[in-house]
Image (cartoon, helix red, strand yellow):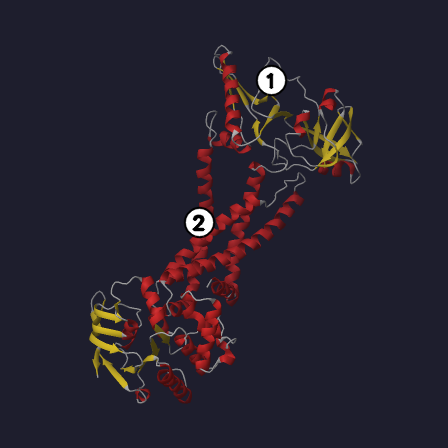
Amino acid sequence: MIELKNVSKIYHTETIETTAINDISLKINKGDFLSITGPSGSGKSTLLNLIGLLDSPTSGDIIVNKENIKGLKDKKLSKLRNKTIGFIFQSYHLIDDLNVIENVELPLIYRKISKKKRKEMAELALEKVGLTNRKKHFPRQLSGGQKQRVAIARAIVGNPAIILADEPTGNLDSKMGDKIMGLLIKLNKIYKTTIILVTHNLSLTTRIERNIIIKDGNLIN
Amino acid sequence: MLINYFKLAISSIFSNKTYSAIVFFGITFTFIIIIILTSIYAQLFGNVYPESKNGKPLYLTEVIEKNTKTGYTKIGGASLSFSENLKKNMKTPKMISIISKGKSINFYVNEKKIPTIIKFTDANFWKSTSFKFKKGRPYNESDFQANSKVIIITDKFEKSYFGGENGLGKKIKMVGIEYKVIGIVKSASSFKEILYSNIYIPNLDNKNNTFNSLVGDYRCIFIVDSNNKLPILKQEYFDIINTKNNISNNKLEVLSNLDTVLESYTRNLFGNTYNNGLTKFYPILALAIIIFLFLPAINLINLILARTSERNIEIAVRKSFGASSKQILSQFIFENIVINIIGLLISIILSLIIIKILDFLFFENINLSINGFVLFVILIISLFFAIITGLIPARKLSKINPIEILQNN
């Protein structure tokens, strides 16, 4: 579904050349649940940017659904990102001025979907995370765990091929963190949602079948 | 999507009230000045009350006689004999009316001085204008021929002279002669210099026309059916002036044109007898508007830029969920248009109040109004302003790197 072939990302400054990702090859199939762990500065974020189609590699190929993203224009890439990737962030990043259901609808407004259909899809996503009763609330009226569940609903609403969860439990206490992890596992098991979890918390990875460790830009399996 | 953007624009206005107040102050202040200036422009040059509604008017306001031998130049309006000659002989206009230049006189009522403008006109004057009669009737050809001692006064003059009483049928004494008021019209704006007066008298006086000159104290209003006939009318007049030049033994050169009100101004400022000056006027006007908008635009761009950091996260989220740079750009320009349109509505309301105050302060009734033309101009200018001021901040925002922003927050 998404494949990285000999991908490298090198950042150039005036004096230094930094290799953030070094010749990484990785294949992610439908229904996979994998974690990427590694210390700070290991290249996790760069890899996240690349898989999330927010950055392009210096060398190598990224193939999404048999399509090589090399040379794709911003419009096409944005469209592909919209359909393929759903993001979950550590700090939730809900839009404060929009209510819960409007936040969940966000990825759908960049597709040509009618308002009625968008609402239906958003309600279904909220049902999956168990937050239907909060749909008219604004983010400031929710707890951290509820915010993260809204963020998960937003990530899954458009049925993207992959959910990219970047430290999704980082801002939550361990009890709530467990619940969120449980929810992600449930989404993977029941709905066959592909999930990539990026974290430095090794305890989270114990519940995940496939773990990838990244260090100094290299994959250590 | 637009409803979503609209809601965001409204909530962004309320989320930082001080910022919004400064933005709206800048926008409304700029727009109010443009609205007032445009309404002055429309009143001065537009086809508004009391100009003819049954045709297109051109005016003869200036005749220059130049003695090519002695260099002696006489400048003024048209003489009565020349005006009457045109009225009798010209083919293109469906109507020609003659009106004198204004004369200032003072009335004293209850020891209060009433400065008054009087003008002498023919009977055609009421057919070549659209004056609204509040009471009574216009004077006609028989009043004119019979040299009836009748006058038309304006509502403003009626109020100041008769102090709220009905002036219709009453008499007003001027230079020892009593005139009966047979009609009361809604006053023209004093900006309509050719048509404006407080009292209109059906009498054309030829006593100033010595030496059979073409120059005198009168103006003529020429009415044609449509815009298409305007150049034909101008050409006919041009031919008449040239004939006058031919019969003057090359001694006397006559320079004169039929102009719209705007042309009569631009010809004086930027043109000459052979050039109406419009080709210089319009670029100068456009440049003046751009220069005027430049400073407030820079201010607004700076204000928006200073605030964009608050919106970085929102943009980053939108981008990561599939918004293209172009969509982000459109969102911000749309928001800026919404803010500008709200500013525009506030400006229109405030301008209406300012116009009322100006009318109250100036007895002469400048009659400014926000008509379709003014609304059209301000709408175009505000859209242009909104797009320009939204574009620069929006371009900056559309280029942010989402993950960098989202991980740092």
Residue under numbered circle 1: B85
- Callout 1, which amino acid? Asn
* Image mark 1: chain: B
Residue under numbered circle 2: B294
In the rendered image, the vertical position of residue A113 relative to residue B375, given as above or below: below
Q: Is residue B117 left or right of residue B264?
A: right
Most extreme residue toward the top, as rendered?
Answer: B249
Residue at the image position 46 percent from the left and 36 percent from the top: B281
Residue A173 in sight: no
Mark 1: few/some/many CA within 10 Å (<14, 14-19, 20+)? few
In the rendered image, the vertical position of residue B301 relative to residue B38, given as above or below: below
Q: Is residue A50 left or right of residue B155?
A: left
Q: Is residue B222 left or right of residue A221?
A: right
Q: Is residue A29 left or right of residue B267?
A: left
Query: Which quadrant of the figure has residue B359?
Result: top right
- Callout 2, which amino acid? Phe
The residue closer to the viewer here, A137 or B358, is A137
Query: Residue B381: x and y, percent?
Result: 48, 48
Q: Give SS at disc 2.
A: helix
Query: Residue A195: x and y, percent?
Result: 33, 80
Q: Find residue A174 and name its label.
A: none
The residue closer to the viewer here, B61 or A108, is A108
Residue at the image position 58 percent from the left and 51 percent from the top: B348
